[in-house]
Amino acid sequence: MGNKVRLTTSQALVRFLKQQYIHVDGEEFPFVEGVFNIFGHGNVLGIGQALEQEAGRLKVYQGKNEQGMAHAAIAYSKQKLRQKIYAVTTSVGPGSANLAAAAGTALANNIPVLFLPGDTFATRQPDPVLQQVEHEHSANVTTNDALMPVSRYWDRVTRPEQLMSSLLRAFEVMTDPGKAGPATICISQDVEGEAFDFDESFFQRRVHYLDRKPPVARELEGANSLIQSSKKPLILVGGGAKYSQAGDILKEISQKHDIPLVETQAGKATVEADFENNLGGLGVTGTLAANKAAKEADLIIGIGTRYTDFATSSKTAFNFDQTKFININVSRMQTYKLDAHQVVADAKKTLEHLSPMLEGYKSAFGHTISSLKAEWEQERARLGKVTFDRERFDPEVKGHWSQDRLNDYADTFQSEFAQTTALLTINETIDPNSIVVTSAGSLPGDMQRLWNPSVPNTYNVEYGYSCMGYEIAGALGVKLANPDQEVYSMVGDGSFLMLHSEFVTAIQYGKKINLMLFDNSGFGCINNLQMGNGSDSYYTEFRTHDDQVLNIDYAKVAEAYGAKVYRANTVEELKAAVEDAKKQEVSTLIEMKVLPKTMSDGYESWWHVGVSEVSENKKVQEAYEQKQSVLQKAKQY
C-alpha cells in the first residue's frame, strides 16, 4: 500500500482536477483550465472551501446564472476543439436544475464539460433539507436525477471513496472523441466535507491520450471504390472535421479532385469561406450554391456530422434515387446514418490515408463549382444592401405582413435597418481574426448563409441544441479561450432577455466581449415559422397590452452594467460604432433596431415541422397538404 493523505472529498476532487493532462499530437497540457462557481449551501462549505485552499493553478470565476456559466464553459471547450475544459459547480436544488439546458447543449454538440452539482445528505438525517424535492416512491431521487438523460456520464457520490472511480470514468468519457460530452458527478453535501485517507498515487500527474484512430484497410478500400465510381461527390464538413483540424487536407483533396465542400453549422470555418471550392452552409439555413450542389451529387462524404434535420433539409436535400453516402466519424453510431459506408476513424487521419488512393480522380463538377459560388456571392451582395420601401416592401421570408404593420415598426424604432444589411456590414468591418458567437433565432440562419469567416476557427455557433442563452455566455467562454482576439456575440432581443447574466461576469473580470444586439421586438424566426405555415402572427411579437411595439432601450441596460454602448440604425452609424468599439478595453454593446422580416430565407430547402392536420384556416390546410407532398420525397431512415 502507498502513502495516504487525509483530505475531504472536495479537497481530493480539486487536487485531482489540477493533475489531469491531455496529450494531443505530441503536445501535453492541462485538461482542466478552471472552475466556474455559484456557491450555495450545497457546495460552498465543501467544494468552496476546497477551492479556497487547493485551487492552485485553476482559474476560478464566479458566475451569475448556473445555465449561463455552464454555457460559457461549453463555448470554451468548443473553441478549444474539445481539448480543454472548465468544471462547473452549483448548489443543490434550483442551482443544479438550472444546469439542465446547458447539459443538453453540451450533449447535443458532443462537448466535454464537468458538472459538479451539490446533492442532498447521504445520511438523510436532516431530510428534507432546504431545496430538496421529495417523491413518495423513492427517497433516492433528487433534482440531480433530471440531469441523467442530458449527461454522457452521470454518477452520485455518497461516500468519499466513491469519488476515485467516479472521476476516472468521467475523464475517460470526456477525453474520448467518440463519446465526448458532459460528465455529471453529484456529491452529497455532507460527503463534500467528509474526510478519507486517499492514496497519494491518485493525485499523481495523469495523462489522457487523445489518439487519432486510423481507418482500417476495409474502410478505406470501400470509401475509395465509392468515390472512384462516382461522378459528382460532395464533401459535407461537420464539427468532427473541425475538432480533428482537418482543414488543410480537406482543401488539398477538394482542389486536386474538383470535389466541392459544403458545411454544417459546427463545421463552418474549418475551411475559410474564400476557399474556391467552399460553397457554404448546407440545408435549411444553407446557401443556394450548397443546396444546388447537393441535389446534383451522387455521393455525399459526410465528415464528422450528425446529419441533423437542418443540415439535410429534413432528409430532402439529396436525390436518394442516385445518391450514396460515406460517413467518416469517430462515433460508430453516427457512421450508420443514411445507410452509409462506415468509416469509424479520425477525420484528418482518414483523409490523409485516402488522399494517395484517389490519385488521378476528377469529379464531373468541374467549372460548375465556381459558377455556383459566383451566383451565390451575387445574391449575398444583394442581401447586404436590402433597403426599406414604405410603399412596397417585399420581405425576404414567407408570411408577408401588411405594409402598415411594417411601417409601424419603422416608426416606433425610428429605423429602417434590415437585418441582413447590418450583418454583412459587421462582417466587412470587424477584424478578420475576430470570433463570432451565436445560437438561436433567425441569426444562425443568416450567419450560416452570409457570414464569411476568412480565418479558420473564428465561427462558434451552437446549433446542435439551438439553445437561447448561449450567445452571450458563450462569448465569455470564447474570450477565455482566445483572450487576444475580439469576440462578437450576435444576439437577438429575445435571447438577450432570456439570459444575459454572464455579460456582468465578463465586465466584472475585465474579459472584453462585444454584444451585437439585433432588436426586432419579438421572436422573429418563430413568427416566420407561424406565418410561413398558414397561421397568423400570434404571441411571437413583443407588443404591449394596447398593441404597441415594445421598444426597449437595451443600450441603457448595458450602460448600467458598466459597458460602453452604441446605438446604430444605419450602415454608417454601425461602421463607426464597430470601429470605436475596437478601441475600448471594456465590454461593449451595439444596439441595432432592425425591422422584422428582413432576415434571409431558405434557398431550395425545406424543414419538416408539425403542421396541424385539422384547421379551420385555409392557409394552414394548404401548408399541411404541401408538407405531405414534400414528405413523399424524403428518406424514411
Image (cartoon, rainbow, N blue to C red):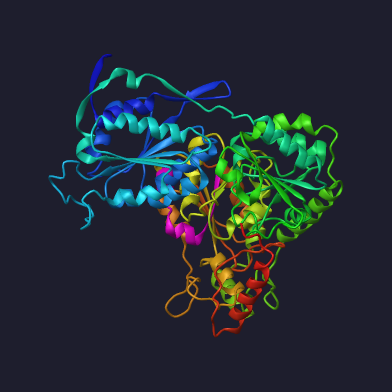
* Residue at the spot 62% in from the left edge and 74% down from the top edge: 399
**Seen in the image, is 375 located left or right of residue 420?**
right
> Could you tell me which residue is drawn at 36 percent across and 32 percent down?
167
The quadrant of the picture occupied by the C terminus is: bottom right
Residue 259 in the figure: left or right of residue 164: right
Q: Nearer the viewer, residue 106 or 576?
A: 106
Q: Which residues are magenta?
A: 487-507
Q: Picture coordinates of residue 316 (x, y %)?
A: 68, 60
Q: Is 350 left or right of 362, judged from the image as shown?
A: left
Q: Residue 518: image x %, image y %?
A: 55, 59
Quarter of the view holding residue 557: bottom left
In this rendering, is residue 380 above or below 26? below
Which picture quadrant has residue 626? bottom right
Q: Taking 116 as reference, is 411 above or below it?
A: below
**Residue 529 part of the magenta segment:** no
538 is higher (above) or lower (below) than 232: below
Task: Give the image location of residue 523, x and y in percent.
Answer: 51, 66
485 or 198, which lies in front?
A: 198
Q: x, y percentage for residue 390?
A: 67, 76
Going by the image, does 5 lie left or right of 215? left
Q: Quadrant of the N terminus?
A: top left
